[in-house]
Each structure stands twice: as structure tokens, then as C-alpha cells.
Amino acid sequence: MSGRARLALCAWAATLMAACALLPLVDPATWILQAAVLLAVQTGVGAVARRVPLARPLTIAAQALVTLVLLTLVFARQQAVAGLFPGPQAFQHFADLLRLGGDDIARYAIPAPLESEGIRLMLVGGVLVIGLLVDALAVSFRSAAPAGLPLLALYSVAAGLSEGGADWLWFLLAAVGYLMLLLAEGRDRLSQWGRVFGGSPRAPGAGQGRALAPVRTGRRIGAFALGIALVVPLALPAMDGGLLDGARGGVGPGSGGGGTISAVNPLVSLRDSLNVDEDREVLTLRTDSENLSDLYLRIVSLDDFDGTTWKPSKRHITAVPDGTFPTPAGLGPDVGRTEIRSLISAADDFAQDWLPMPYPPSAVRVAGNWRYEPVGMTLVGDHGQNTRGLTYEVRSLSLQPTAQQLAAAPQPSAALLREYTELPDSLPGVVPRTAREVTAGAANPYEQAVRLQEYFAVNGGFEYDTQVDIGSGSDAIARFLKEKEGFCVHFSFAMAAMARSLGIPARVAVGFAPGSPQADGSVSVGLRDAHAWPEVYFEGVGWTRFEPTPTRGSTPAYTVTDRPGSSVPDPALPSRNSQAEPSAAPSESDACSPEDKKLDACATESAVAVPVTGGGGPPWYALLGWVLAGLVVLSVPLAPLLWRLRVRARRLGAHGRGEADAGPHTLAVWQELTDTAWDLGILPEESQTTRKAAARVVRLGRLDPAAAAAVHRVADAVEQVLYAPRPRPTAGLTEDVRLATAGLRATAGRAARLRARLAPRSAVRVAWAVSARWAALKRRVAAARPVWRRTSDQQG
């Protein structure tokens, strides 16, 4: 196999190894096989084109054209000319797929479904584009080192989105692929590095079992690079979040017939909805329900508590079931129920990704692109679908469990208990301790849940106030229990966490409390009806609503007991009456005018849903760490350029004017001249005399007479310094070097000048200097060992 063929094979393997970092993002991972085959065809076309041979631009153009044809064959065959050649319709189809892929990236959780054609096009097409860049740089232009940049970009995208714990494995694969590409770049270049790091060449017949210098050198370079890459991140600030981090904490729309969903937490704007100056109607509904006080419109359930806030778990979604929905989890046949019908209309300015519905729904008739999440029994929009101006019909069950049924509920399954009683280790001890104190003497989970509800709503001394800014974090619930002021988010979060601490499955629901009946028989639901409440699971009944927030919503009839000391409010209390309470009155914001609030132009804030630390924003030391990390990242690719500028300034800058300074200055300007020629592609020949080296620079650099004369004047000065008994300073050497440098740059191509500036070849002198110092240190250590041994022997 020829050197270029071997290099092309390594470029193909390195791209695939870097692409493995994308495997955790999509399920199943079979797309990597398709990408490998298409990438192999692309690489083979490049190898054939170079064998012809074609010019480098033509080779890359041929590979790009074949890549486009391959993508057309796989993703746009029906829109292509003759099923193979892309036309206007094919390009439009690609644009549509990319747009859909962008939507799916924002909507799906990790791992996303491979059924999404947009995501699959992004994956396969992205790998092919990166592969083309790597092949062009490493094989066509024989410059493997810059090929690490597209490989790094491919890995960085995956690392920025991945949430798994095996990121180190994908990094190791990508790093090994890149080092393999470096080793295969060519024996000549590698041997040059080998003389630097590998020491003196092996003597004939010595150590046949040892690796050759280039291979041994590659191992040392690889170990050194991997060590730096693995150690340096430990000293940098941890990177939480990222470009799509806001989409990892909640629920949102999905796509296709399956997959998972995850989007922004709906609690972000709940408090702002409660504090609007003018209550705006967002939903109207007509229903045949006889009890409007229980008609909560549920949007989504939050069942994942990380110690900071509650958020939806990542769930698989399916197509909306035709006809009747499945029976809600845990609902037994003995529970009384009535099916009700509700016709709901959303306002034109109310755009919600989730479909507000009474719980549990039994059937939905809705237009548009919607998907069904079975665990929460919610509907989520697909590809930008929302509730704006939508009218839909929902059939739902109005359940009437009795207190006796709830008290006699058997133990839930172990799996359900494990999932819905999980609490973070950071939960303050006051939370479970208070839960045990409040529920002391309760005979069963039902009585415990009722006592928790009464503690918050009746006898615990809590007040409802939407202006409270308690903050978030592991101590947020503890502060709420101490201050005893908050709004529905605080009450529902605290009760759900305390119920879980008692071993009772609990979650938080977000939606709208019952609205206000109108004269025409409809019910009006406004922004101030936005609400959050806890749901507790009882086997045989299912998820059951509780209402711990005082003066809000309605207390479920099955939680009203005749126990002495119980003073639960009237179950029929409408939610709008709560607005008459002084603590719930909206207040004017100094930072946002009423006009801005009406236009939704105010900044969104929620005391629990949005983390607050001190004055807001990350601490100063985190910002400082990121600034320093950014400077380090920027300095790495610019290091050769900066080093070269510094060396050039030192060599051509001020110097002494005495005879003692003539030698160092003359040799410095000569080295600057030869290094500039080296950077522009004229390799130095150390075996040649100064005069022959100057003639070689003039010839290969195609210098004009003025620049050639300047080179020869510098060479004459070097000879005078090297061989004259008493070297004398020569005037004008700096100007001669600048004149010769300008001549060399004028005859060099644009690519050569760009490479000489950004990646100067002479920067390898840094590695030589480090290697020389390391070798000198080893010699000193080796020389000192016999002295230490003799001293030790004498002392012994």
C-alpha cells in the first residue's frame, strides 16, 4: 500500500472514530454503518483522483460532487433527476429536512429517535463533510496536523450535547484516531520529529526488539498529548449547560411516531402570569361537568426532582391514540367516575406547546400535529405546533374516589415506588423531619397526605404571596418552611418532596385552576388561573390531586375529613375569589411598565424554576475562570504565530553596537532569514556552507536582484563573523533581512504566506529546545547517580 493510500485509510478511520462520540445522541446507532459506507466511497473517489493524478482542487471537487450524489441517493431519491442527480426539488427537500432536523434537535431528548430523517441527514451529512475536510487536509495537502481541527469540531458538538458518563471513551477514540493520522502522514516528517524526541538513532544491530525511532517517537508524542488533554480539563471550570442546555430540563414536542421529549420547564413564567396587571383570557371552555370547581386544566406533570427544582422526566412519545385513550395507570374498576365533555378554545395570543386538558383524558379531537406521552397522558405539539387560536374537544373522566378507598389502597409496585419517591441527597434534613412531625400518628399514606395538605393550607401558618423571592437550590424548600410565605409553586414543591420523604409516590402538575363561569354558560380561564398542585399516587385510584395552596383552587372532596381540628376550606371555593386576598394582589414592577407587561416584553422570572444566587448570574470566580479558559483556548492555535512574532522582533530589534555584539546579532538575523525561508517552504540545508545556502534561498525563492543582493550581503556578514579574527559589526543587516523577506513573500503563493503566518514550520525549534533541555537534564541526573551511590556506599 502506498503512503497516500495508507494516509487516506487513516483519515477515514480517524473520522469514524471521532464520529463515535455522536453515538449516544441517537437511538439506534445504526446510522454509523451507513455513514461508514458513504465515507468509504468518498475516500475511494479521492484515492482514484489522486492516482490519475488530478490537481488538488479537482480532486476535492470530485469528492464533493460524489458526496452530494450519495446524499441525494439516500435522502432525496424521489426528488432527484433520474433518482440520482440533485435538482432544485432535491435541494429544497434537503432544506426542509435540515429545518425539521433543527426543530427535532430542540425538541427531542437524548437519545433522539433515528426515525427523524432530519436528524439522520445532519448526522450522516455532517460526518461526510468532516471526512471531506480531513481527507483534503491530511491526504491531498499532506498536512495532517490541521486536520485535527475538523475532528475536534465533530467531537466538540457531541461532547456539548452528551449527558452520558462515557465521554472519556469517545475522547480517547477521537484522540487515538488523530494520532494515528499523524503517524501515517509520512516517514520523512515523522523522522524529523523522531530526531527531536527520540534521541540519537539506533546503532546497527542494537536492540532488534525495540521499535523504530518514528514509531517510538509517535508513542511518546501520543502519550504526551493525551496526558495534556486529559489533565488540563481538570484545572478548568466545569461546563454545565451549553447552547441547547435549556432544552434538557423539561417537556416539549416530539416528532414522528416515537422518540422522547424534553423542552423548557413550564414553571419559568408561572409567577409572572399570576402577577399581570390585567388578567388576560387565554382559554374559554364549555363543558357538561356539574362540578366546575374540580375542572383543572392540566398541562404537564413534573416528576423529576434534582434538589433545585421539579421538572418533567424524559419520556417516549407515540402517535395520538385513535378513539379512547388507555385506562390511567392505577385506576381500578371500583372507583366512581363520570365522563365529561369539554370544548376548549385558546386565544390567538396564547401559544402553548402542551395541550391543556382535564385529567385524566379519555379521548381528544384536535387538529394539527400533536403527539401523545402515555405516562403523563399529555399531548405535545410537533414541529412548532401550539395552541394559538386552536379549538379542540376533550373527553375526560371525573373521578370520585372515597376516603375509605384511598385509606385502604394497597402498596404500589416496587418500580413505581422507586421512581416516584426518589429524592436527592442534597435535600435538607428539615424537610423529612417536618414531614414526620406533621404526620405523626397517621395510620396510612392517605392520612399522611391529608395532614400535609392541612399543614400548608390550614393550620401551618402559611401565607399566599406571589411576590416572595425565596430563591432556589437545595435549601429553597427549607427556607420556604421557615419563612412560610410563597405561592403555588412553593406549596406544591414542598408537599411533593415531603410526601416522597415519607415513601409516598408524588409528583407536581402544572396547568390552570378552575376558571370563572360566564353568563353565556362558558368558563373563562385567565393568566391568573395559572397554577401548580401536587399529585399523589394510590394503587387502585391512580394519580390523585391535592390542594395545599391556601386561597387557591378547590380542595378535593375526598380529602375533607371529620377529624377534630380539621378546618379545610369549602371545596367549592372558586379560584377567582383568591384574588380578593391582599397577599395575592399584583404589585407594580419598577423594571417593567404595564404597557410592556401587556406586550409580554418583560423579563421572565420564577423564584423556584429559575436558580437565583445572590445578585443573580454566576459568581465572579466562575466568570474569571471562563475568561481565563477562553484565553487559553484562543492562545493554543495562535501560539506558533505569537511565538514567531516575538522571535522575529527579538532577532531584528535593538542590539549592542560593540564588536562583542557583532557575532550574536549577525547570526540572529541570518537565522531569521533562513527561518522565514523555511516558513515559506524552503527547507534549510545545514550541511551547506553559508554562501551555498544563500544561493539556494535566492534560487528557490525566485528573488529579484535587489532581494538577492540583500541575501548575499547577510551571508557575507555571517562568513566574516565566523572566520574573521576580529569580527566587525555590519550596518544595515536588519534592513537587508526585511528586504529579502519581502522578496520571498512576494513570490510565494497566498496559501504559502497564510501558512507561514499561522503555522510557521520554524516553530518546531521550540520542541527542539525543549528536547535539548530534557536531554541535558537526563545527562545531569545520570552523571549524578554514581556520585549519590558512592556517597551512599561510604555512609553505609
Image (cartoon, rainbow, N blue to C red):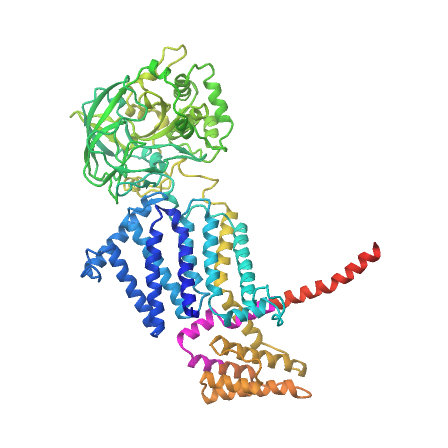
Image check: 266 left or right of 755?
Answer: left
Residue 380 against residue 9 in the figure, above or below: above
Quadrant of the rendering where the N terminus is positioned: bottom left
Name the residue located 84 percent from the left edge and 57 percent from the top edge. 794
- The total of numbered circles placed on residues is 0
- Counting from the top left corner in percent of width and height, residue 283 is at 23, 33
- Out of 699 and 534, give the one closest to the viewer: 699
Q: Is residue 726 visible?
A: yes
* Residue drawn at (35%, 64%) of the image: 43
Q: Quadrant of the C terminus?
A: bottom right
Left or right side of 549 for 688? right
User: Can you say whether 160 is above or below 338 in the image?
Assistant: below
Q: Is residue 624 above or below residue 6?
A: above
Q: Quadrant of residue 702?
A: bottom left
Name the dominant secondary structure of the magenta segment. helix
Give the side of residue 766 with respect to residue 152, left or right.
Answer: right
Which residue appears at 44% of the width and 30% of the height? 422
Residue 72 lies in what quarter of the image? bottom left
Residue 756 x %, y %: 46, 73
Residue stretch rendered in magenta on the structure: 741-770
- Residue 764's quadrant in the figure? bottom right
Image coordinates for residue 233, horizontal then vertical, percent: 52, 52
Any magenta on residue 695? no
Residue nearest the viewer, comparing 309 with 615: 309
Q: Is residue 569 visible?
A: no
Q: Position of residue 308 (x, y in %)?
A: 44, 35
Seen as rendered, the residue at the extreme left is: 520
